[in-house]
Image (cartoon, rainbow, N blue to C red):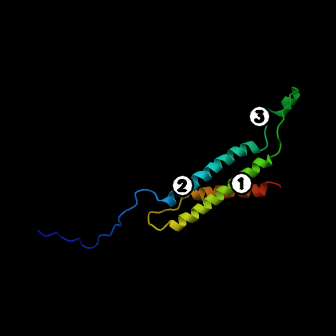
Amino acid sequence: MTEQQGSGTETHQPVERRHRADSWVMVLRAFGIVGYLGLLAALFLYDQAHPQRSVIDERLLNGLNLTVDLRRTWDFDLAQNIFYLMLLGVFLGGFGLVLSARRNRRADDSYRLYLTLLTMISLAGVLLYLTRMQF
């Protein structure tokens, strides 16, 4: 018996030698995790830093001789910390995108959407801080 050879139209499939994510992928994931934890912390700080609002009508409280002490301005120390967390997100996301682009050599490699979103959201936060905060 003789074996028949292929017609020569088959494409050569490279052998996949990677068994797990390489160290660069793990670094990119760590950048994403740290960046999004920073965004979450910034949201909590925003809740504490913005001017306080009364849930009940203040005129009603004044009519009942009750006073409520509300902070009418931003807490600038907390707002500055939000700015630093946003800068951290911009740098981690941007550096992660650069690393991702440098290692994107295989056909199945892709750009990291979570790093792109992290960079865009953080950059928007930095720009809002710079345009709205009065120093």
From the viewer's side, name the closer residue of 77 and 109.
77
Q: Which numbered disc, 3 or 1, marks the residue closer to the eye?
A: 1
* Quadrant that contains the C terminus: bottom right
The image shows residue 117, relative to residue 44, as above or below, that is below
Structural crowding at the residue carrying mark 3, measured as other residues with C-alpha within 10 Å and reported as few (<14), some (14–19) or many (≥20): few
Q: Is residue 74 left or right of residue 109?
A: right
- Give the percent coordinates (x, y) of residue 77: 78, 48
From the viewer's side, name the closer residue of 99 and 48.
99
| Residue drawn at x 87%, y 30% as measured from the top left | 62
Q: Which numbered disc, 3 or 2, marks the residue closer to the eye?
A: 2
- Give the percent coordinates (x, y) of residue 26: 51, 56
Under mark 1, the amino acid is Tyr
Q: CA distance from mark 3 to mark 1?
A: 30 Å
Which type of secondary structure does the marked residue at label 1 adopt? Answer: helix
Under mark 3, the amino acid is Val
Q: Earlier in the sequence, mark 3 or mark 1?
A: 3
Which type of secondary structure does the marked residue at label 3 adopt? Answer: loop
Q: Which residue is mark 1?
A: 84
Q: Which residue is mark 2?
A: 29
Q: Are marks 1 and 2 in contact (CB under 8 Å)?
A: no
Q: Which residue is mark 3?
A: 55
From the viewer's side, name the closer residue of 23 and 104.
23
